[in-house]
């Protein structure tokens, strides 16, 4: 089975995780050469990507395509480039051409509702974001909340008008592209279309734009081939799983269990609804169903729900309060997972306590009660939606005969990255090392290589692995890439 992938961008979560999950399932995943894709703030070559699609479409059973990469040249490019809307829309024609020429080709498309980041970091935003980003974010929140009758009136006079108008122009362009892909869906170009909202919240420009999109969904009378929900970096993995499920004609059934049942109604950071809704949306995206009877389930999803502090584990007083509140429940969860494993059940662990890293209290409990290698999947890396989407895909890849070595490799990769790097190493790097630049890249890579290899040895039950070939693909400390070799 050959699948094509046009990734959201070049980051490992978007371009490499799908490859690794495909390796577990025995799928052959084809993608354009790296030179055609985006590289940090440099857009991908949209013309070359369209050419690659023409050359390879006849070999593919299905295509997973990021509209952001196809028309803008990637996620960051969708936020910072100035291509005219008409030029962007013309780049969608390749999808019509592919469907006409290859009517049996399944096309799974996804596009994002552009985020408004509250972080004053312009690495993946317009240059002025370090100056005006948080103020624009606050204005966006207040503007939308006011429209719903909540909160004070937004204070526009505090903003630099040219920056706000530029944001609004880009958002209008993004909305027009999203309407255009809805038109492609109406033309039956897509077998499935996902319009996801990047780093969303209860209020904001993006939240309102999602309502506009949902209105068109409702006018169509509902449509099983169109999904609208929060997400971004995990969508390619989720659609890879969905493709696998659709081709196998085997919808996986999931039984869900929360470490603290009351906390399933807690909203995780960067989401717009309770975590139980986030899980429902992601299960639907991968083509699965939820069941109430564990005996009917193909897999169990064990959820560590958002902690009361939610935003960060690294505030000592709050971390200790979280531990007191949750430790007993997480020990009970780990014991229950052990019982399920002993019964021959396949268990997916979604560690959603904090964004951007594992919950050390859960990791401690799991290592005391089970062999980590006996899990079907684990995730704890970014937003709740990111974590769930990738973990579900990781589990679904094991529905049929699968490559056990690649499954263990990706499971180990998750613990090495989500716990050893994101929770343990990254805070140290942020505190002790100067701002990222070319003079410190080698030192950072050396620190990560040494630190991961020191820490991975203490993860029980995964076997002996060595981390090699560490990369910092975005030249920042937020994400890493690396290889794993058996010892």
Image (tube, rainbow, N blue to C red):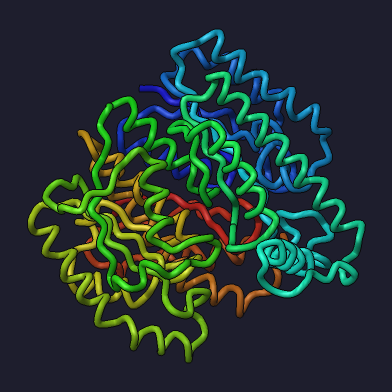
302 to the left or right of 430: left
* Visible residue check, residue 451: no
469 to the left or right of 252: right
Q: Is residue 43 above or below residue 117?
A: above
Q: Quadrant of residue 358?
A: bottom left
Residue farthest toward the left in the current orientation of the protein: 343
Q: Is residue 67 above or below residue 318?
A: above
Task: Give whichever of 94, 265 is nearer the camera.
Answer: 265
440 to the left or right of 482: right
Q: Quadrant of the N terminus?
A: top left
* Visible residue check, residue 346: yes
Q: Quadrant of the C terminus?
A: bottom left
Q: Residue 173 appears at what percent x and percent y?
A: 77, 40
Residue at 21%, 34% (x, y): give it.
400
Q: Residue 313 appears at what percent x and percent y?
A: 47, 78
Residue at 61%, 44% (x, y): give it.
112
Q: Quadrant of residue 342?
A: bottom left
Residue at 90%, 69% (x, y): give it.
157
Residue farthest toward the top in the current orientation of the protein: 101
């Amino acid at each position: 089975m050959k699948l094509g992938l046009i990734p959201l961008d070049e980051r490992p979560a978007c371009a490499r995780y799908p490859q690794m999950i495909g390796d577990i399932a025995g799928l052959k995943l084809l993608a354009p050469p790296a030179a055609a894709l985006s590289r940090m703030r440099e857009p991908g070559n949209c013309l070359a990507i369209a050419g690659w699609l023409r050359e390879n479409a006849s070999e593919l059973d299905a295509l997973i395509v990021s509209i952001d990469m196809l028309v803008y040249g990637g996620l960051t490019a969708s936020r910072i480039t100035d291509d005219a809307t008409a030029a962007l829309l013309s780049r969608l024609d390749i999808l019509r051409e592919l469907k006409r020429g290859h009517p049996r080709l399944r096309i799974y498309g996804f596009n994002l509702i552009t985020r408004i980041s509250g972080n004053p970091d312009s690495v993946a935003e317009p240059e002025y974001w370090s100056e005006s980003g948080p103020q624009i974010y606050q204005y966006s929140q207040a503007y939308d909340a006011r429209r719903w009758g909540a909160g004070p009136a937004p204070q526009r006079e505090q903003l630099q008008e040219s920056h706000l108008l530029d944001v609004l122009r880009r958002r209008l362009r993004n909305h027009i592209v999203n309407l255009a892909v809805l038109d492609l869906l109406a033309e039956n170009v897509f077998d499935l279309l996902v319009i996801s909202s990047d780093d969303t919240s209860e209020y904001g420009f993006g939240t309102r734009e999602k309502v506009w999109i949902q209105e068109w969904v409702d006018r169509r009378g509902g449509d099983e081939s169109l999904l609208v929900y929060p997400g971004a970096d995990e969508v390619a993995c989720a659609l890879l799983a969905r493709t696998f499920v659709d081709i196998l004609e085997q919808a996986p059934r999931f039984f869900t269990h929360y470490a603290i049942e009351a906390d399933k109604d807690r909203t995780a950071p960067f989401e717009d609804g309770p975590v139980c809704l986030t899980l429902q949306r992601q299960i639907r995206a991968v083509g699965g169903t939820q069941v109430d009877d564990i005996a009917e389930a193909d897999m169990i999803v064990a959820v560590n729900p958002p902690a009361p502090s939610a935003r960060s584990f690294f505030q000592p007083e709050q971390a200790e309060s979280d531990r007191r509140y949750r430790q007993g429940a997480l020990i009970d969860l780990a014991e229950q997972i052990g019982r399920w494993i002993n019964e021959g059940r396949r268990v997916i662990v979604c560690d959603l306590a904090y964004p951007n890293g594992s919950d050390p209290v859960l990791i401690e409990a799991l290592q005391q009660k089970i062999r980590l290698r006996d899990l079907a999947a684990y995730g704890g890396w970014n937003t709740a939606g990111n974590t769930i989407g990738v973990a579900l895909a990781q589990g679904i890849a094991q529905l049929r005969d699968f490559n056990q070595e690649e499954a263990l490799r990706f499971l180990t990769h998750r613990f090495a990255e989500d716990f050893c790097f994101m929770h343990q190493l990254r805070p140290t790097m942020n505190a002790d090392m100067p701002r990222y630049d070319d003079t410190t890249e080698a030192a950072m890579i050396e620190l990560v290589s040494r630190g991961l290899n020191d820490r991975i040895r203490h993860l029980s039950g995964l076997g002996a692995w060595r981390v090699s070939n560490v990369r910092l693909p975005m030249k920042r400390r937020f994400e890493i890439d690396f290889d794993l070799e058996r010892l």
